[in-house]
Image (cartoon, helix red, strand yellow):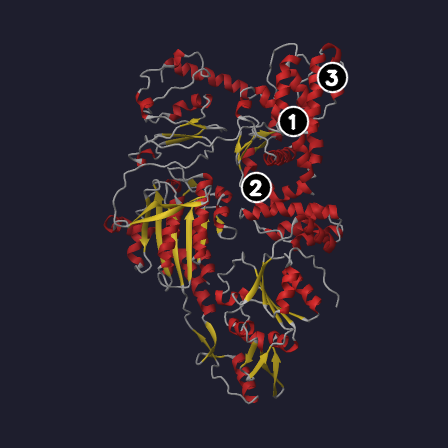
Amino acid sequence: MTRPYYRPIHHEVEVFQHAYGNQLALMLKGPTGCGKSRFVEAMAADVGRPLLTVACHDDTSATDLLGRYLVEGGDTVWQDGPLTRAVREGAMLYLDEVTEAREDIVVVLHSLTDHRRQIFLDRRNETLTAPPEFMLVISFNPGYQRSLKELKPSTRQRFVGMSFHYPAPPIEAEIVAHESGVDMAMARRLVTFASKVRHLQELGLAASASTRLLIHAGQLMRAGMSPRAACHVGVIEPLTDDSETITALQDTAALIL
Amino acid sequence: MSLDEALFTLALRLKRAVWRDRAPAAELAREVRLAEIRAHLTLVARALSGAPLGIQEAEHVGGFAGDVLYLPRAMSFAEDPEANALAYLYRVAYTVTSRQLGCVLSAESTQAAELTTLHTLLAVPPTIEALEAELPMTRELRQRFFPLLLHCRPPCLTLHTPGALLEAFTQVLLGRNLEVWHDQEREHTAGWEWLQRSVTSARQGHGIAAARALYASLRRSAVLKDAAPVAPVILWGQLMPVPPRQASKEPGDTGPQASLPTGTEQHGKAKEQVRRVELNQQDIDNDVLVHTFEKVATAEEFCGVIRTPDGADELAQHIEALDELDLRDVVRSHTQTRSLYRADVTLDGTVGDIASAETSDTTRFLYDEWDGKARQYKKAWCSVYVTRPTRRAASSHGSAYAAAALHKHARHVRDLRMAFDRLRAVRVLKNCQPNGAEVDIDALIDRYATVRSGHQPDDKLYLARRRQRRDLVTWLLLDISSSTDSWIKGHRVLDVARESLLVLGEVLSSYPDQIGMSGFYSHTRRDCRFIILKDFTEPWLPCKAVLASLEPTGYTRIGPAIRHAIHLLQQQKAPQKLLLLISDGKPTDYDRYEGRYGIADVRQAIREAGQVRIHTYALAVDVQAKLYLPEMFGAGNYQILPHPSHLVESLAQLYTRLSS
């Protein structure tokens, strides 16, 4: 497996390696599309462990993570959940948007993230201890308030925390150019546009333009769309439904692209 | 009105009618007015600058002062409305860049018109350079618009007056070749040299420093002293001084209630650079007894005297005369206003204070207020008086009102009940129950598997419809300040807000949800009122009638009201708490709880709510609210309703969504 592209911004790679070496669980915070998942993929490739990713939703329960018995013909078969599998194999487990999951998963996470590093499968009466290679990474978006959910302090304090932000403009341009294939000059303009949109986000008027959206727009341009049209469908429309904000952003894009 | 006055008015109107129709129809057809695109340009300006900029109409070409951009009333020089809208866009980008570069006038530079023009012109090349580095497409717009503007400039053949020199300088900056005036070299050597020097120092970008020297030599270089004013370029505007910030003491106040506006309201012309004037009581007492216009030759010479307002409502008769006057001094007074002559101005002075005799009341709460500029709390700054409307007064009239309103919204009540029931029906279906109406297939399979694998099975195999316990308490905060007396699209804001509270209260009364309601208004920090309409535990029935007794009054000091609601919610045990604000969203109070200060305080109050895990949400009817509501409440935590009649539905939907 080739290592996915990841451009380090601060000390995050170093932090990851220390956390991994000391068997500490990692908590990543940051807005959508800023590179959290990509970071985890790259790090898993670096340490040479397989990566299991679970996108949590409001019905994700402890059973889903641990595993269950399935009926197969007249027999029952135990099926490991992703968490159990990761612990057995010494893989990396990445729980994306962990705040969305049901509250009962904390029971599992707690014993796994303290000194015990164990999970207990009550159905099988089996206790598994995580090998040193196993690592748990969770992520969530603190600014995202669709439902009134957040992690409890008792859960949070079992993790090493890192905040992700959108990279500084020169680095972001580099990333956009690399991922989408547009030239650096165009990538720089896209990033300038994104910084303007983020101004509005600070004032609460629009969602933030993520690096991911810029890459989408870049890919559309690479495929032959005009820059303004690519920006419109690739960045502006996904951000907001408010027609006035859309036209204002289109005008802003027109000044830059 | 006497006969001569009437005759004069008639003559004036006639003259105006003749003059006004001069604007050619073609120009009107391609004209774009600021009013049409102001909201949209505000968003662009904010995106470009990252600052909470506002846009106001300028008297002439405008500029910027502090956080306000002043733009011309209309744009018509380009070939069609679309191009003119683009020209506005260019102008916004230009002015934002100029603001970022910090191009402002010093106070003494405003004295001479030529110095102002010179400063403005010298700032043009650096601004354009910065603009095109940041926003590359403005180069195309410049190449398209500047020739059009150049075409409109008056012809300028010689360089013998200061006016002509500045005009030539303007035209060079707009793209005319400097060599056009080369033949003047022999005739007006000094003028030609001045022009060359100005252009060089403008292009080298150290224009601001050179302005003084160029101004000094401007008059020397010209042969004639005639100084015809040079028309400013509409795409550049003019530089303005930084708005002054002056601290002031308010005069002793006996009754803020008395100065609340009543009576007629008329819209006046826009004014930029308003000055605040402090008066002391002695000046007011000593005012000239009689002072007629005959003593001064023209309105321009009339510098104003201090008069005690007589309070009569004759605004309609005087509206034309007022439009002619250059009104730009503002005085705070405590005399009751009978008429409102409204103009868009921004007064962002420091926060004043009033010394008012406090009424003693047992249910007084003191709250801190956040001073955004000083970044600290003013301890125990606001007094919130918690009152309850008198039940007796409300009884019969109120019940009739409630019945009528509920009848009017019968459909909403029914729909909302159904929505709630549906919501519950979905939610209460619980799996893995020890008993219930249906079999839980998943649990059954699980049980089978567990038994087969030789383990102790679980007996919870049923699906049950249960009423889910929802631990949500909600406080509804209703703004009942004077601004809710305004009418939007044929509905009075307060009426609609009241009705939506009635509908929501009516529906929720048959469910176990805990809900509290209150109205709020204020007269300065010493008198913030918090009127409890319904407490959490109170039965709904008697509360209905109370709603009718609400009348618009006072100002909107949102901060203390939110803080008191937080206080009430914190006493509740439920894990989820919700605070809903229905308001026009603009914080205002008599003692300068306005502008940035007010917004900063509300924002801080919302942050405080977040710290104690109370979720806040705002609903506003005013379209203008879009410009400040997001900043106070954060993205996704507010909703602006295009039409007041949507409030009933939106409130219901919102509650359903947040409580599910």
Q: Which residue is mark 2?
A: B46
Residue A133 horizontal/vertical position (percent) = 65, 73
At 52% from the left edge and 58% from the top edge, which residue is drawn?
Answer: A145
Chain under numbered label 2? B
Instruction: Determine the residue positioned at 48% across, 30% down.
Output: B244
Query: Quadrant of residue A165 in the image?
Result: bottom right
Q: Is residue B172 visible?
A: no
Q: Residues within 10 Å of mark 3 (few under 14, many from 20)?
A: some
Question: Is circle 2 on the same chain as circle 3?
Answer: yes
Q: Amino acid at mark 1?
A: Gly
* Mark in the foreground, 2 or 1: 1
Looking at this view, is B231 or B490 the one in front? B231
The residue lying at 53 percent from left, 48 percent from top is: A204
For this view, does B549 lie left or right of residue B152? left
Q: Is residue B100 left or right of residue B426?
A: right
Q: Is the residue A3 above or below the residue A116 in the image?
A: above
Q: CA distance from mark 2 to mark 3?
A: 41 Å
Residue matched to label 1? B207
- Front position in the image: B581 or B108: B108
Report the Cα–Cα distance between label 2 and label 1: 28 Å
Identify the secondary structure beneath mark 3.
helix
Mark found first going from the N terminus, 1 or 3: 3
| Image-based side of B1 in relation to A40, left or right | left
Residue B181, labelled with which disc?
A: 3
The reply, left or right, for residue B242 in relation to residue B549 is right
Tag 1, which chain?
A: B
Give the secondary structure at mark 1. helix
Q: Position of residue B354 (x, y in %)?
A: 34, 36
Amino acid of disc 2: Arg
Q: Indicate the quadrant containing the C terminus of chain A: top left, top right, bottom left or bottom right.
A: top right
Which label's residue is closer to the chain start, 2 or 3?
A: 2
